[in-house]
Image (cartoon, helix red, strand yellow):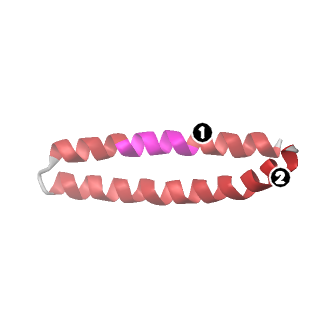
Amino acid sequence: MNEPIRHKLSHLLPHWLEHNASHTETYRQWARRAREAGLGDVAHHLEQAVAEAEALGRALETALHTMES
């Protein structure tokens, strides 16, 4: 019963990691742009989103490594 779930997660987790990394970079770029445009408060919130997205990436990586061990 666990094998179909393991199989699905073995495909989903790398996809989610890649997708999250792409979004994280986008948030980082827009935070920089916002700061350059004088929107410091907006940049700060986007930088918080970057930090949270990075934490999410670490959790997904841990899940993937746990499945592989």
Picture layout, residue 28 above or below residue 66? below
Which is the main secondary structure of the residues drawn in magenta? helix
Identify the image quadrant of the C terminus. Answer: top right
**Is residue 33 a member of the stretch shown in magenta?**
no
What range of the chain is rendered magenta? 49-57
Which residue is the site of mark 1?
59
Which of the 4 quarters of the picture holds residue 18? bottom right
Residue drawn at x 62%, y 59% is 15
Please tell me whether mark 2 sits on a helix, a strand or a loop: helix
Residue 27 at x, y percent in the picture: 35, 54
Residue drawn at x 78%, y 43% is 67
Identify the image quadrant of the N terminus. Answer: top right
**Which disc is residue 42 wearing?**
none
Which residue is the site of mark 2?
4
Amino acid carrying mark 1 in the image = Ala
Please tell me whether mark 1 sits on a helix, a strand or a loop: helix
Q: In this view, does 24 lie to the left or right of 14?
A: left
Residue 10 at x, y percent in the picture: 75, 54
